[in-house]
Image (cartoon, grey):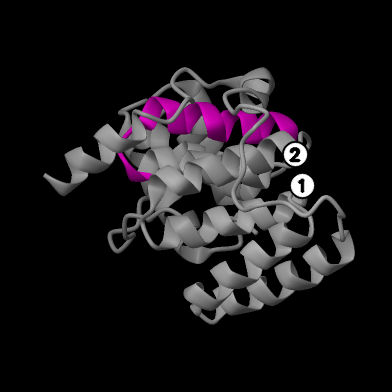
């Protein structure tokens, strides 16, 4: 019941068919506000508040981090990293609707940044909207083809969708070759062995490979 409620809530987010760079820029009105903005922008102060918030997130002091991030936006509403990190706080506290708003606004403010797009994929994956999650991970990879995290996230979603095509094998092979996290490489080897095909040649499954879970949002 709780899962269906989260799904219904997220359906309200104006991202419905979001895909690609164009869609990552749309969906939010120009009047979107998280907190009231001071007409005098102080980007340096926003940067300081944001840096403190990153440390607080690492220490799991999420209430304090949220206050710092809102202070950052009070200093400069258009400081994109603060929106991305506030989305991180909301994601960690399962406020997925608010997280999606913040990540999309961060994507609007930072059109070349991979992090908010990868993070939007995490939000949609968390509520079971795998097609939307895959599109956002794919958008992140278009911006940064070398992003191991986005590749791993997209591989996981495609496996969850039952995809066994060459694109999935290529993603899993990329995880095996480039991902520094042993639990992810073990999982990817196992999935390649199960799928089979040319990319799986010489890949052996590990009996103790645990299913991987989504990463935390990227700062």
The C terminus lies in which quarter of the figure?
bottom right
Q: Report the disc number at residue 78.
A: 1
Q: Secondary structure at mark 1?
A: loop
Q: Is residue 144 visible?
A: no
Residue 34 versus residue 28 in the image, above or below: below
Task: Say which of 199 and 151 sits in front.
Answer: 151
In the rendered image, residue 206, in percent from the top left (x then y), is placed at 34, 57
The reply to whether discs 1 and 2 touch (Cβ–Cβ < 8 Å) is: yes
Per the rendered image, the range of residues in magenta is 126-143
Q: Report the disc number at residue 179.
A: none
Residue at 67% in and 26% down? 25
In the rendered image, residue 131, in percent from the top left (x then y), is placed at 40, 25
Residue at 67% in and 43% down? 106
Residue 67 versus residue 153 in the image, above or below: below
Q: Report the disc number at residue 109.
A: 2
Residue at 88% in and 65% down? 44
The answer to whether residue 199 is left or right of residue 54 is left
Mark 1 packing: few (<14 Cα in 10 Å), some, or many (20+)? many
The N terminus lies in which quarter of the figure?
top left
């Amino acid at each position: 019941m709780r899962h269906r409620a989260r799904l219904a809530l997220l359906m309200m987010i104006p991202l419905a068919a979001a895909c690609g760079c164009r869609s990552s820029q749309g969906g939010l009105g120009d009047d979107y506000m998280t907190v009231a903005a001071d007409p005098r922008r102080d980007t340096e102060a926003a940067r300081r508040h944001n840096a403190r918030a990153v440390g607080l997130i690492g220490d799991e002091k999420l209430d304090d981090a949220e206050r710092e991030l809102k202070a950052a936006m009070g200093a400069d509403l258009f400081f994109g990293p603060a929106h991305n990190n506030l989305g991180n706080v909301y994601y960690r506290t399962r406020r997925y609707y608010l997280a999606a708003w913040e990540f999309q606004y961060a994507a609007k403010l930072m059109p070349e940044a991979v992090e908010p797009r990868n993070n939007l994929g995490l939000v949609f994956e968390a509520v079971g909207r795998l097609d939307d999650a895959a599109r956002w991970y794919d958008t992140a990879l278009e911006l940064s083809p070398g992003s191991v995290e986005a590749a791993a996230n997209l591989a996981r979603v495609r496996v969850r969708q039952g995809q066994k095509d060459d694109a999935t094998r290529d993603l899993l092979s990329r995880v095996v070759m480039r991902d520094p996290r042993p639990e992810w490489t073990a999982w990817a080897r196992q999935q390649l062995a199960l799928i089979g095909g040319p990319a799986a040649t010489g890949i052996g499954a590990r009996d103790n490979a645990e299913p991987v879970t989504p990463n935390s949002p990227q700062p």
